[in-house]
Image (tube, rainbow, N blue to C red):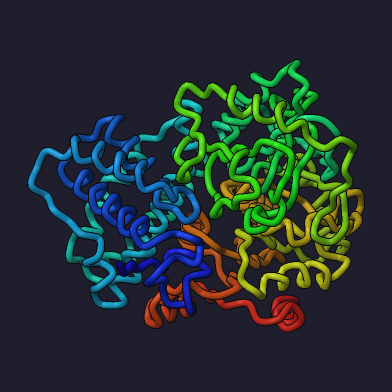
Amino acid sequence: MNMFCFQCEQTAHGKGCTVQGVCGKKADTSNLQDELTSKLIELANCAEKSDMNTELLIDGLFTTITNVNFDDRSIKEFIEKVQKNIHCDSKFDIKTVWDCDEDIRSLKSLILFGLKGMAAYTHHARVLGYKDVDADNFFYEALQEISKDLSADELLNLVLKTGEINLKCMELLDKANTETYGTPAPRKVTTNIEKGPFIIVTGHDLRDLSLLLEQTKDKGVNIYTHGEMLPCHAYPELNKYPHLKGNFGTAWQNQQKEFDNVPAAILFTTNCIMPVKDSYKDRVFTTSVVEYPDMVHIGEDKDFTPVIEKAIELGGYKEDKKMTGINGGDTLTVGFGHGTVLSVADKVIEAVKSGDIKHIFLVGGCDGARPGRNYYTDFVKQAPKDSIILTLACGKYRFNDLDLGEINGIPRLLDMGQCNDAYSAIKVAVELSKAFNCSVNELPLSLVLSWYEQKAVCILLTLLYLGIENIKLGPTLPAFVSPNVLNILVDKYKIKPVTTPKEDLKEILNR
């Protein structure tokens, strides 16, 4: 059976996966996800706007993000659930989008993939009880528009509106996280693992981690974050648990090597799950939207007893184990969200005015397996000593164990959090532009971004909506962006692909 998928950065030959996904997704699974997407568009076209239907749209879109759900059975069940709520004759097949004019396909893909990323952020806010009516309504509106015969100009406007609404979603999630778990504050996190039973928690969901921490209290089981869960150590209501010990491993694409025969239970709260190897499949558990065939799934009751029992059974390492990041460091510093950075904004402003800080780089985004991502490590290493580096998402694992020193007491490397915490970077940039009485584009600030999946797409759309220019994007440009659409982005926003760290730094600093 054939398939077509080009929604992630590593898509085959930079064009599209047609036999099996490079992510490990089988053709049957890909086609089921297309069927689910089609049903969600049908639901948006004819269902009433209810909380139940909105949740179906959000969780259904989230389910189809790269490396979230590989389980055909659960996808079929979701399709049936959506179908039961479709009470009209609306029919739509997403394959009509893949087959249409390349520019229309490109623009509709930008909208659809942006919606998928937005759904992830909205999902995380909703599980904490936070909702936004404009965002909820936009899922219906945008999915309806994808099914229509619209002009390129109409679709381009919708692309920018997707970015606008995603900004609301990121702001909502920031509010949900901070009001629930406190304002992130700087904290040093070890990569070393203590002896004894432990659980590795990966994904993005703070609520799942909070529930697990409470359920493992006083049970002699330590908890370690992995991947995008690393920033959780910065939240007061999470780091108050003494058995939240540190961070295991690096970014998501290294999990098959890092989880190999590890004597611990592994809980996937959301993406990014890779095909599970035999050497650790007996200790993997999933929850929420993430599922994988034959893995134990923790349902809505969030009873993590099976995870805890497995950790105790495995016993962990018999002795303390030293582990490091990619560059050999064993200490990571987190917690530089907008609350922290803006609390010392006067120091940053004064350092910029005095010339002690000559440039600020935002180097972050999704990590991935494609060769060429060492670019980001080399870029940070080569960045001038009088510059500071803001970073976020899992792309930071390329360099977050480096000691870059300080400027006037300000660390040169500031970890702002998860991918959704791009809101923090935006807020800081806007506040700095106000302080200097200039536009964001006039600040000594440059964005050097890496992308992999759809959450990175919606962040990019938000940056475009805000009019941010001169973004460096890599390691490759999206396959779903047609030459004509790319020309629009280049002409209007001056987006450029990364080249080499040396050349890009030269261009940026001489601009």
Vertical order, 447 against 51 (above or below): below
Q: Nearer the viewer, residue 282 or 509?
A: 282
Residue 245 appears at what percent x and percent y? 80, 33
Residue 485 appears at what percent x and percent y? 39, 76
Q: Could you tell whether 487 is left or right of 158 in the image?
A: right
Q: What is the total number of numbered labels drawn onto the structure image?
A: 0
Furthest residue to the left? 89
Which residue occupies 25% across, 65% down? 95
Q: Could you tell whether 447 is left or right of 192 in the image?
A: left
Q: Nearer the viewer, residue 71 or 146?
A: 71
Which residue occupies 83% across, 69% down? 381
Vertical order, 486 against 25 (above or below): below
Q: Nearer the viewer, residue 73 or 445?
A: 73
Residue 119 appears at what percent x and percent y? 42, 45
Vertical order, 40 against 376 (above or below): above
Decide if residue 340 is in sight here: yes
Q: Could you tell whether 385 is left or right of 63 in the image?
A: right
Q: Quadrant of the C terminus?
A: bottom right
Q: Could you tell whether 484 is left or right of 211 in the image?
A: left
Decide if residue 142 is in sight here: no
Which residue occupies 57% across, 77% down? 496
Residue 159 appears at what percent x and percent y? 37, 61
Which residue occupies 42% across, 56% down? 114
